[in-house]
């Protein structure tokens, strides 16, 4: 029963297992889907999907599998009714509004009616069309502000529609989300050892035996400290102008790093497009906050884990030529790539996080320098999944 | 479904969405633990109370801390107490059973009637913690090694587990759970929730407050979005402060109740300023309490 749905879920990247599938069958056997598609949608999701980050994939698979299930005809009328309901405009920002200005109510209704007529001819019944919501242009309007309205109050009417709305798109791990998710990813960056600080809550057996012996057999418990995280991190951030579009995501990572209290040491450094003989302690990258890169290498031992955060996109000369720095008053005797290689050689673990999505690395304007830098540092895109990959890389020796 | 007369539909002071009710009932019917995730302030912990109340069962709460071990939930053998007692000889230490204390899971197993067991914030514990509980939750019994006794569950407890997603939970554990993510309530749902806590609230005031609240939540880049509990506090503050509904959208009084971070506070002020809203200087001082 529904076995293709099982494989479809897998194909969409939801990690379903036989155990869970059998559990679903057991639940269906007990009639827990309440004999409705909506009931089945919620039941199957509760049993099969174990993370909100997979909800979106589940929705896609569900819409795919069940899109041809008949939806009652009265829904077509309902769609028009829903459209009547004017919704408060303040929920859309003015910028978004501009984008969809042409989608006013009459226009939308006209187009919808038109579409319904067309679809009737082809599909023998307009009811079906609503079921396919996710794939028609109007279904897609589920993602744009005007469209959410259409489906907004119908949530419980049809499961396919719920699925096609993709309410959980924001929870996907391969999308860039937020501070909290970054924090969770960063938490994986830990190496436990040493006994320096923290509460004494582990029984020190050897000491206890010795002390008890000293007291003539009267029990003396001796407590010792647990293990501590010893990871030291340096975050190197590009503060160049080309990074401006990514400011928000970068500041989210910055916040997450800052809040991660579990690092033994955490340092921030800035550079402008590429690293030369100076690094900066402030994002303004002016000489009053400069430290010599040589000193930086001396100060930070090879055990620091280094994360570069930058788009790695610059003029080729900035990377490969002496005197190529973008700041004209700043003469660099050695090309930036030499400094980058020096840093890569000094630290045992270093990675580069790039806010530009990975599929564009070969195509963007900066692809030439991105390719060169990728030879020096393993590069990951700045998403939760990318960060997790980077952290795995930081934990093993290159 | 009919064979299970127990049917959770939310309680008077806890509004559960239909989805959530379904998940709870599925978990109860299948006898599986229900894992609940969700934004802070969406009432994850409250859910277990509500289930216990709604189904008329006893609630046992096992609060997980970073030092909690799975074994603590089954039973604790107080060796240190026994050693101390043995040194003074004023207690009978020959019977180990005096020094075995049941943990929360053990208590739930031994309860006379089926109980609701809340394992709160399971992600705080060590990464292996959930796996260590798998066996006991599956077969509903455990052995006390020191006495050789077996504790068998009289009634399979309804197990509710909450997680704040601070750590990934192991796959083997997830496979055995029913999972539900509590989405942040929409405006209609939120109105009901507020009414539960403030039944006498003026409708107009509620509408204005909710509109302002969702507007603030919609601002991108907030470090900590205000959640249900902040909204409830805010509504309280608005009522006590005698604010009229018209003032809310114009002045955003007591903003500090909603926003706890400087960065967020400034971001919202900036937005308001851009829209020509004059926030009274008084709000600045109010947020310092």
Image: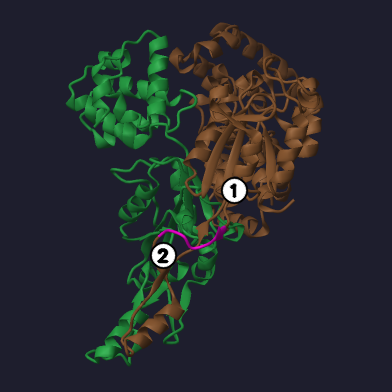
Chain colours: A brown, B green
On whether disc 1 and disc 2 are found on a single subunit, the reply is no
Which residue is nearer to you in this view: A63 or A276?
A276
Residue A174 lies, in percent from the top left, at 65, 37
- Is residue A48 placed above or below A104 in the rendered structure? below
The local crowd at label 2, few if under 14, some if 14 to 19, many if 20 or more residues have their Cα within 10 Å, is: many
Taking the spot 73% from the left edge, 35% from the top edge, the residue there is: A340
CA–CA distance between discs 1 and 2? 23 Å
In the image, A218: left or right of A369?
Answer: left
Taking the spot 60% from the left edge, 61% from the top edge, the residue there is: B172
- Is residue B195 placed above or below B276 in the rendered structure? below
Which residue is nearer to you in this view: B167 or A31?
B167
Residue A230 visible in the snapshot: yes
Report which residue position mark 1 lands on: A49
Give the overall secondary structure of the magenta segment: loop
Q: Is residue B163 magenta?
A: no
Taking the spot 64% from the left edge, 29% from the top edge, the residue there is: A278
The image quadrant of residue B115 is bottom left
The local crowd at label 1, few if under 14, some if 14 to 19, many if 20 or more residues have their Cα within 10 Å, is: many
The quarter in which the C terminus of chain B is drawn is top left
Report which residue position mark 2 lands on: B157
Element carrying mark 1? loop
Element carrying mark 2? loop
Taking the spot 38% from the left edge, 40% from the top edge, the residue there is: B41
Residue A372 lies, in percent from the top left, at 81, 32
The image quadrant of residue A361 is top right
- Is residue A383 placed above or below B105 in the rendered structure? above
Task: Please report, as a chain letter, where disc 1 is located.
Answer: A
Residue B264 lies, in percent from the top left, at 41, 26
Task: Please report, as a chain letter, where disc 2 is located.
Answer: B
Residue A111 lies, in percent from the top left, at 64, 11
The image quadrant of residue A220 is bottom left
Question: Magenta segment, which residues?
Answer: A192-198
């Amino acid at each position: 029963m529904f076995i293709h749905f099982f494989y479809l879920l897998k194909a969409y990247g939801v990690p379903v297992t036989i155990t869970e599938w059998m559990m679903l069958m057991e639940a269906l056997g007990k009639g827990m889907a309440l004999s409705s598609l909506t009931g089945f949608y919620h039941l199957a999701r509760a049993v099969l999907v174990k993370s909100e980050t997979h909800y979106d994939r589940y929705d896609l698979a569900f819409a795919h599998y069940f899109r041809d299930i008949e939806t009652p005809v009265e829904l077509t009328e309902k769609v028009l009714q829903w459209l009547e309901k004017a919704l408060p405009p303040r929920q859309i920002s003015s910028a978004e509004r501009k984008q969809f200005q042409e989608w006013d109510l009459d226009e939308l209704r006209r187009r919808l009616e038109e579409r319904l007529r067309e679809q009737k001819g082809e599909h023998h019944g307009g009811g079906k069309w609503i079921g396919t919501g996710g794939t028609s242009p109007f279904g897609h309007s589920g993602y744009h502000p005007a469209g959410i309205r259409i489906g907004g109050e119908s949530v419980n009417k049809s499961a396919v529609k719920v699925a096609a709305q993709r309410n959980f798109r924001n929870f996907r791990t391969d999308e860039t989300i937020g501070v909290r998710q970054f924090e969770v990813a960063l938490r994986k960056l830990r190496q436990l050892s040493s006994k320096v600080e923290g509460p004494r809550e582990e029984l020190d057996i050897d000491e206890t035996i010795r002390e008890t012996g000293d007291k003539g057999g009267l029990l003396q418990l001796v407590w010792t400290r647990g293990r501590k995280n010893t990871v030291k991190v340096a975050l190197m951030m590009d503060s160049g102008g080309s990074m401006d579009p990514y400011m928000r995501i970068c500041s989210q990572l910055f916040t997450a790093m800052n809040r991660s209290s579990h690092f033994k040491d955490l340092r921030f450094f800035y550079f402008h497009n590429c690293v030369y003989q100076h690094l900066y302690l402030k994002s303004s990258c002016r000489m009053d906050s400069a430290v010599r890169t040589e000193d930086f290498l001396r100060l930070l031992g090879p055990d620091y884990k280094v994360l570069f955060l930058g788009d790695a996109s610059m003029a080729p000369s900035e990377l490969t030529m002496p005197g190529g720095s973008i700041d004209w008053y700043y003469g660099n005797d050695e090309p930036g790539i030499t400094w980058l290689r020096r840093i890569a050689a000094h630290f045992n673990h270093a990675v580069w996080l790039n806010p530009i999505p990975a599929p564009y690395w070969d195509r963007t304007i900066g692809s030439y320098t991105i390719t060169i830098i990728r030879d020096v540092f393993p590069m990951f895109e700045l998403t939760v999944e990318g960060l997790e990959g980077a952290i795995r890389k930081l934990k093993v020796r290159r | 479904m009919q064979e299970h007369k127990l049917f959770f539909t939310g309680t008077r002071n806890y509004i559960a969405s239909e989805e959530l009710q379904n998940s709870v009932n599925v978990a109860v019917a299948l006898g599986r633990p229900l894992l609940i995730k969700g934004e802070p302030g969406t009432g994850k912990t409250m859910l277990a109370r509500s289930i216990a109340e709604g189904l008329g069962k006893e609630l046992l709460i096992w609060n997980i801390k970073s030092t909690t071990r799975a074994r603590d939930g089954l039973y604790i053998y107080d060796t240190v107490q026994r050693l101390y007692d043995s040194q003074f000889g004023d207690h009978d230490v020959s019977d180990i059973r005096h020094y075995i204390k049941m943990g929360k899971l053990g208590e739930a197993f031994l309860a006379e009637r089926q109980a609701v067991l809340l394992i709160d914030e399971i992600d705080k514990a060590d990464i292996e913690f959930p796996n260590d509980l798998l066996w006991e939750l599956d077969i509903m019994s455990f052995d006390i090694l020191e006495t050789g006794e077996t504790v068998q569950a009289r009634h399979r407890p309804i197990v509710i587990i909450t997680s704040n997603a601070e750590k990934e939970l192991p796959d083997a554990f997830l496979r055995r759970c029913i999972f539900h993510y509590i989405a942040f309530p929409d405006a209609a749902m939120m109105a009901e929730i507020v009414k539960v806590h403030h039944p006498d609230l003026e409708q107009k005031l509620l509408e204005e407050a909710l509109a302002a609240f969702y507007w603030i939540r919609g601002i991108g880049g907030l470090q900590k979005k205000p959640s249900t509990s902040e909204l409830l506090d805010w509504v309280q503050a608005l009522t006590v402060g005698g604010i009229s509904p018209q003032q809310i959208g114009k002045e955003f009084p007591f903003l500090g109740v909603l926003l706890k971070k400087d960065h967020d506070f400034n971001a919202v002020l900036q937005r308001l300023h851009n829209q020509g809203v004059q926030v009274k200087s008084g709000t600045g001082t109010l947020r310092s309490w």
